[in-house]
Amino acid sequence: MKLGFTLPIVGPAISSSAGLRAFCRGIEDLGNDTLWVGDRLVQPVDMQSIYPGKEQPYPPQMKRYLDPVLLWTVAATATGRVRLNASTVTF
């Protein structure tokens, strides 16, 4: 069985390239086989949520998404063995 992880594309986990590189290296060092990137290329201008039952704005750290190709670039420079995959984007 091959195991993999999805790279975060939103939130505080992507606040620095050093942290993201460390995450990728850690996944590889633990023996996992793949890193996956989601494809959130378009987002609403004014995101709202009705969770937990009332309309409220998303927190600021949840409004910034990184481009999948940028995430692959960081992952590729930080790892040597894992395969990089996408949920939708193909080249």
Image: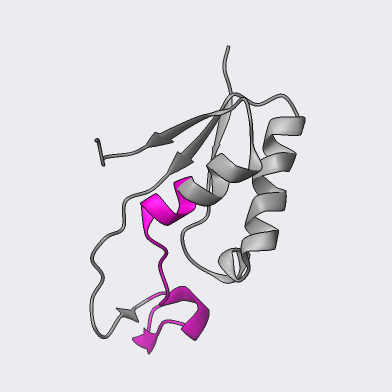
Looking at the picture, the colour scheme in use is one colour
Q: Is residue 44 among the parts visible in the rendering?
A: yes
Q: Nearer the viewer, residue 84 or 42?
A: 84
- Residue 24 found in image quarter: top right
Left or right relative to 84: residue 79: right
* Residue 75 image point, x, y percent: 56, 44
Q: Nearer the viewer, residue 67 or 53?
A: 67
**Looking at the picture, does residue 1 appear above or below residue 88?**
above
* Residue 23 image point, x, y percent: 68, 49
**Looking at the picture, does residue 7 appear above or below residue 80?**
below
52 magenta-colored: yes
Total tally of numbered discs in the picture: 0
Q: Is residue 52 among the parts visible in the rendering?
A: no
Q: Residue at the spot x=57%, y=65% of the render?
A: 14
Q: Residue at the spot x=62%, y=62% of the render?
A: 17
Q: Residue at the spot x=23%, y=83% of the render?
A: 45
1 magenta-colored: no
- Residue 78 found in image quarter: top right
* Residue at the outermost front position: 77
* Residue 58 image point, x, y percent: 42, 81
Left or right relative to 59: residue 31: right
* Residue 18 image point, x, y percent: 69, 61
* Residue at the outermost top position: 1
- Say which quadrant the C terminus sits in: top left
What's the magenta region?
51-72
Q: Residue at the spot x=37%, y=59% of the render?
A: 67
**Looking at the picture, does residue 65 appear above or below residue 74?**
below
Q: Nearer the viewer, residue 45 or 56?
A: 45
- Say which quadrant the N terminus sits in: top right
